[in-house]
Amino acid sequence: MNAFFETGLSFILFLPTFAIVGAIYCAWPRAPRGAMRWLADLAVLALAAAASIVAMRWGFDASTGRGGHLWPQIVATLLAYGVFLAVLALAWPLRARWLRRRRRIGVP
C-alpha cells in the first residue's frame, strides 16, 4: 500500500482525538478571549497538526516492520499523538505568560 495513503489514514483516524484535545486547549482559561488569543491558539493548533503529520510520516518510515504490517501505523500514530501533545504542552505556559503580560499592561 502507498505510504502516503497509510500515514494519511492514520492521521484521519486520530483526528477526533486531536480535535478534542485541541478544543480543551482553546477552551481553557475561559478569559480573556480576544481576537489575538484566538489567532494565537489557531496558530498553535496548526503548528501542532503540522508537526504531528511530520512525526507520523517519519515514524512510518522509521519503523522496521517487525510485528507485522500494523506495527508501522502504530508507531506512526503514537509519535504523532506524542508530538501533538508536546507542542500543546510547550505552548500552554507560554500562552499563560503572554496572557498575564497583556493583562498587566491593560491590553484586552
Image: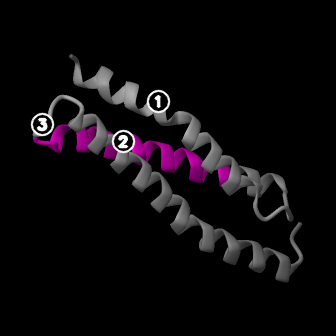
Magenta-drawn segment: 40-65
Judged left or right of residue 63, residue 42 is: right
Task: Give, as a three-letter code, the residue at label 3.
Answer: Gly
Which residue does the image show at 46% across and 61% down from the upper left? 86
Crowd around label 1: few <14 · some 14–19 · many ≥20 (10 Å): few
Task: Give, as a three-letter code, the residue at label 2.
Answer: Thr
The count of marks equals 3
- Secondary structure, magenta segment, majority class: helix
Numbered mark located on residue 65 in the image: 3
Q: Quadrant of the N terminus?
A: top left
Q: Which residue is mark 1?
A: 13
Q: State which tag comes first along the sequence, 1 or 3.
A: 1
Crowd around label 2: few <14 · some 14–19 · many ≥20 (10 Å): many
In percent of width and height, residue 67 lies at 14, 38
Which residue does the image show at 47% across and 29% down from the upper left? 13
Q: Which residue is mark 2?
A: 77
